């Protein structure tokens, strides 16, 4: 600090500018303690905006943001003249006691004029902590009680205007706390602002106190930014106004109308007195008083915003400045806007934006767009520009470039195509989905991220959405998300072929049941960069499995169909078409044709490509398949997935027709050509090989979930679970058939690696006698003398956790807790 004290003023100023730019409040505060020279130089940087958030985020011992704000308020108000501090402020903040404490601690230090350096005064709504207000109303001496019960306090709080007094659930103390916080905010703001109005550049004004500020608007010549704070209670939740007289409700509405009109009048007067000085005026919603959210109507905000100059070259458009833009849309220069974030709810503001949606074409450097759908044709201009520029390229090659000299050239010639990279578009409705398709075509050269979601309103949606029509090559596209929750998502057969550099794909809809003859498969795509593929619904059914031959970097694969809750069985269930229909869908005759079919085999009009299950996916970590994909799954796929850690196969509740009998046929692969003939989901009763088969092993798989009619015999449990998955840690069973719980527990005891948890979701909790026979016990009752596995055991709707005894042999004469078929 000694070296800093000897710094020249210019060097010190440079250091202070850096600290202020980096918002190093703690460092600036420490400089106040060096000497008067340093303190005087530091004050303008530290107290230019004393109530900024960072001022109260310092690491203070035994303190918080609220406590820090209270201390700052007391310090600033204590330096005001007594006659300028109203009693409703001085008493709750205990200004007299604070002055005595400060005088005792700093008898030798000259006072510092902090407010002389303040240029931005925004006293936040939460400035008065609940503790301060509660203390004032509960632990006060008689003179304070006299003030609370007196006419001055009643006039300030205006309790007769608050509707909650008609609600017997609200005690008077609660109402007083809320009202007092509003009054404190209003009066403290005026006490601090009034002496320095001429120097303020930014000011937060309580909306309920706007009349007082209209009277001094001529003193606000430096004001550039005003924020109206809605702290007075005008709006109530519906249940709070039940029983209130209509007259009082009308009076409340009238008071709000007067205040709203006064806000407009304040801005109008200021712009007349100081033309062009005021840059922004906002009035955000507020619920800081733990009451109903207080809102300034959009129409009122648009009225006072129209008096202001347009937004000065905004770099972003979002909820903070949207109203200002809508107030002057055509006059706003959007040439520097690189980001738009306008996920608006339906309403007047969205309608206004829709009527001015041509503004998108004026954002010539736009890179990021988050938008609620603006309807059909919103991006047609982008397609036209792209085609125009493609045509101009041909014209340049032919020597026809003289149009570049024209003064009124198209925007795409003057500035180039809009370099849009990331798009989130929500709640589209038109069945043509031309917004998404136009975005893909118009910004094909730069688009990296496309995320589109349909509206959730099923009443106005078409039965299906079509994507991908007319798409051109999107070489930059890495992230593709399309979702239609209440309609079918149909992706053009060639769409993915145009996106060779995709890294992440998620396509989803709510398709549950279907007919195989309606499934038109896509063409196989080459996606060498793909790491995540999430397909749900119709996109899963139409996906071409040969695409997986070109995805060596794939890490996550989810191919699922929606599951539904069955009230009769009280469980989730999948839909799988009849086996005969599945065979025809894949044009697989096999044993089906030889099974005595009385009709000739009929080739379906649309044949779906067969799933070979022999892809090489060295990086895949997670596989999740449901419905027909789980039913068709062949474990030989694991040979090409050495890094697989999670495998989930769910065909829950599909009935007795769709069963999978697991045997050695599933976990051994023939090594000779004559043994390599696999039937369509048909496990032979006997398996013989001309040469030793190869064992299928998932070397690092930790989590296995099988749901549905998986038939697993006791004799095959160890071979399947411990042999195929030597590193298994978590096993989930739901709906298995043919095994006994005792045999499964013995596998857990003898597995090469101890399991962490077994979830038996289709078994009820065993009785005490069954537990004893199975060698399991309540974990809470486990004795240190009884060695148990660290494997946790969970049953369907269990009341406690169970542990598995280590040294336990199941009696061969006891068969208990068989899975119910």
Image (spheres, rainbow, N blue to C red):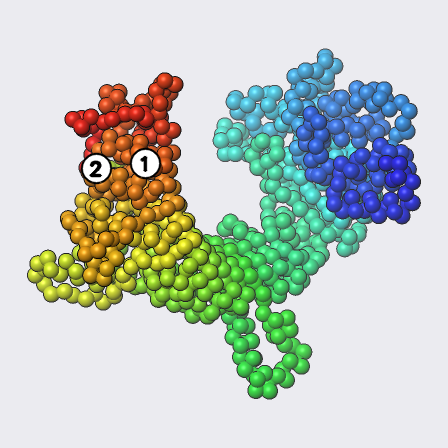
Measured from the top left, where is residue 277 in percent x and y? 77, 52
Residue 42 vertical position relative to residue 679 in the rendered view, above or below: above
Note whether residue 647 is visible: yes
Residue depicted at 16% across the width and 65% down the height: 602
Q: Is residue 675 above or below residue 30?
A: below
Residue 60 found in image quarter: top right
Which of pointers 2 and 1 indicates the residue nearer the eye? 1
Disc 2 packing (10 Å; few <14; some 14–19; many ≥20):
some
Position of 215 compared to 555: left or right? right
Dot 2: element: helix
Nearest to the observer: residue 730 or residue 495: 730
Mark positioned earlier in the residue sequence (2 or 1) = 2
Residue at 26% over, 49% down:
667
Query: Residue 249: image x %, image y %?
Result: 56, 33
Of 401 and 506, nearer the camera is: 506
Tell me the CA gap for discs 2 and 1: 15 Å
Q: Which residue is mark 2?
A: 714
Closest to the observer: 303 or 616?
616
Where residue 215 sits: x, y (%)? Answer: 78, 41
Label 1 Cα crowd, 10 Å radius (few <14 / some 14-19 / many 20+): some
Asked whether 396 or 83 is in front, the reply is 396
**Numbered disc 1: secondary structure:** loop
Q: Which mark is residue 751?
A: 1
The numbered mark at residue 672 is none
């Amino acid at each position: 600090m000694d070296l800093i004290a000897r710094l020249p003023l210019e060097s010190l100023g440079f250091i202070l500018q850096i600290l202020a730019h980096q918002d190093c409040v703690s460092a600036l505060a420490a400089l106040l303690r060096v000497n008067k020279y340093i303190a005087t130089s530091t004050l303008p940087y530290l107290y230019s905006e004393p109530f900024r958030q960072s001022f109260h985020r310092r690491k203070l011992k035994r303190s918080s943001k609220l406590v820090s704000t209270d201390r700052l308020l007391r310090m600033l108000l204590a330096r005001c003249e007594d006659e300028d501090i109203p009693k409703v402020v001085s008493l709750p903040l205990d200004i007299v006691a604070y002055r005595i404490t400060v005088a005792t601690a700093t008898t030798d230090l000259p006072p510092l004029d902090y407010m002389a350096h303040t240029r931005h005064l925004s006293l936040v709504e939460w400035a008065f902590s609940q503790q301060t207000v509660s203390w004032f109303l509960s632990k006060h001496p008689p003179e304070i009680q006299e003030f609370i019960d007196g006419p001055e306090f009643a006039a300030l709080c205006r309790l007769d205007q608050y509707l909650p007094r008609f609600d017997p659930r609200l005690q008077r103390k609660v109402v007083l706390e809320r009202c007092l916080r509003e009054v404190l905010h209003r009066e403290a703001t005026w006490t601090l602002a009034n002496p320095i109005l001429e120097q303020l550049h930014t000011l937060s004004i309580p909306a309920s106190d706007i009349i007082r500020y209209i009277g001094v608007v001529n003193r606000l010549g430096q004001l550039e930014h005003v924020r109206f704070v809605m702290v007075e209670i005008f709006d109530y939740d519906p249940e709070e106004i039940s029983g209130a007289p209509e007259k009082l409700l009308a009076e409340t509405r009238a008071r709000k109308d007067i205040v709203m009109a006064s806000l407009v009048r304040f801005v109008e007067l200021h712009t007349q007195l100081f033309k062009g000085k005021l840059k922004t005026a906002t009035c955000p919603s507020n619920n800081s008083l733990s009451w109903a959210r207080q809102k300034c109507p959009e129409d009122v905000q648009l009225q006072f915003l129209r008096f202001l100059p347009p937004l000065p070259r905004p770099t972003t458009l979002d909820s903070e400045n949207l109203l200002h833009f809508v107030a002057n849309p055509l006059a706003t220069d959007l040439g520097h806007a690189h980001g738009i974030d306008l996920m608006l709810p339906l309403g007047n503001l969205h309608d206004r934006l829709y009527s001015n949606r041509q503004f998108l074409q004026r954002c010539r450097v736009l890179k990021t767009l988050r938008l609620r759908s603006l309807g059909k044709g919103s991006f047609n201009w982008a397609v036209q520009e792209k085609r125009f520029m493609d045509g101009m390229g041909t014209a340049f090659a032919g020597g026809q470039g003289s149009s570049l000299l024209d003064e009124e050239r198209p925007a795409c010639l003057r500035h180039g195509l809009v370099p849009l990279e990331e798009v989130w578009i929500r709640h589209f409705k038109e069945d043509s989905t031309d917004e998404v398709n136009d975005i893909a075509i118009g910004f094909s050269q730069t688009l990296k991220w496309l995320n589109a979601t349909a509206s959730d309103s099923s009443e106005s949606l078409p039965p299906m959405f079509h994507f991908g029509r007319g798409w051109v090559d999107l070489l930059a596209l890495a992230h593709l998300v399309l979702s239609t929750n209440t309609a079918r998502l149909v992706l053009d057969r060639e769409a993915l072929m145009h996106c060779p550099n995709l890294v992440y794909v998620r396509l989803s809809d709510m398709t549950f049941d279907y007919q195989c003859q309606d499934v038109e498969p896509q063409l196989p795509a080459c996606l060498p960069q793909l790491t995540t593929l999430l397909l749900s619904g119709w996109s899963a059914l139409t996906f071409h499995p040969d695409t997986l031959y070109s995805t060596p970097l794939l890490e996550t694969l989810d191919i699922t169909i929606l599951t539904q809750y069955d009230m009769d069985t009280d469980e989730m269930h999948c839909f799988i078409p009849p086996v005969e229909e599945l065979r025809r869908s894949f044009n697989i005759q096999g044993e089906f044709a030889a099974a005595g079919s009385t009709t000739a085999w009929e080739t379906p009009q649309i044949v779906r490509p067969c799933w070979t299950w022999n892809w090489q996916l060295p990086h895949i970590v997670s596989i999740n398949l449901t419905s027909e994909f789980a039913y068709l799954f062949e474990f030989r796929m694991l040979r090409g997935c050495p890094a697989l850690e999670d495998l989930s196969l769910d065909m829950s509740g599909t009935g007795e027709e769709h069963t999978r009998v697991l045997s050695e046929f599933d976990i051994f692969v023939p090594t000779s050509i004559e043994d390599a003939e696999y039937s369509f989901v048909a496990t032979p009763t006997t398996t013989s090989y001309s040469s030793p088969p190869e064992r299928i092993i998932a070397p690092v798989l930790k989590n296995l979930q099988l749901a549905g009619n998986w038939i697993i015999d006791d004799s095959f449990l160890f071979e399947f679970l411990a042999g195929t998955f030597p590193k298994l840690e978590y096993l989930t069973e739901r709906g298995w058939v043919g095994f006994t719980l005792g045999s499964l527990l013995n596998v857990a005891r003898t597995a090469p690696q101890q399991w962490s948890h077994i979830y038996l979701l289709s078994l009820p909790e065993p009785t005490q006698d069954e537990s004893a026979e199975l060698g399991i016990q309540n974990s809470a009752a486990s004795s240190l003398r009884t060695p148990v596995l660290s494997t946790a055991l969970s049953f369907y709707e269990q009341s406690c956790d169970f542990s598995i005894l280590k040294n336990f042999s199941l009696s061969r004469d006891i068969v208990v807790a068989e899975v119910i078929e």
